[in-house]
Amino acid sequence: ISGKSGVKPVSVGRPPAETVDVTGTGYPASSTIQLTWDGTINGMPRVRTSESGAISASFTVPVTAGAGTHKVAAGSWGR
């Protein structure tokens, strides 16, 4: 996941309850980034960026996730 624009979705095709690791670059330094799952923040972590604007986080695929591909995105919190 990367992008100075704040959001660049990526597709995730993992089964429910599996852990997904994400990394990203190009975010404002020392800021808070919110991950989203199919456009919602429910159950998704907020991540603090490094001094270089990088993020690293893990989350669990929601147990309610249906079969198929889902979108994970990251954007500045409060936007």
Image (spheres, rainbow, N blue to C red):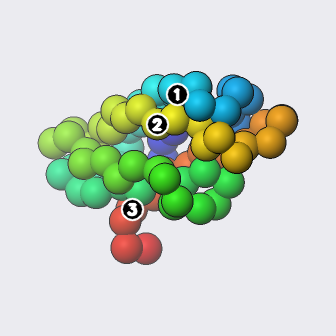
Q: Residue furthest right?
A: 68
Labels 1 and 2 touching (C-beta < 8 A)? yes
Counting other residues with Cα less than 10 Å from the Cα at mark 1, is it few (<14), some (14-19), or many (20 or more)?
A: few
Taking 79 as reference, is 49 left or right? left
Vertical order, 4 against 25 (above or below): below
Label 2 secondary element: strand
* For marks 1 and 3 on the same chain, the one whose residue lies earlier in the sequence: 1
| Residue 37, image x, y percentages | 60, 51
**Pointer 3: what residue?**
76
Frontmost of labels 2 and 3 is 2
**Pointer 2: what residue?**
59
Task: Evaluate whether residue 8 shows in this view.
Answer: no
Vertical order, 77 against 32 (above or below): below
Disc 2 marks a residue whose amino acid type is: Phe
Disc 1 marks a residue whose amino acid type is: Val
* For marks 2 and 3 on the same chain, the one whose residue lies earlier in the sequence: 2
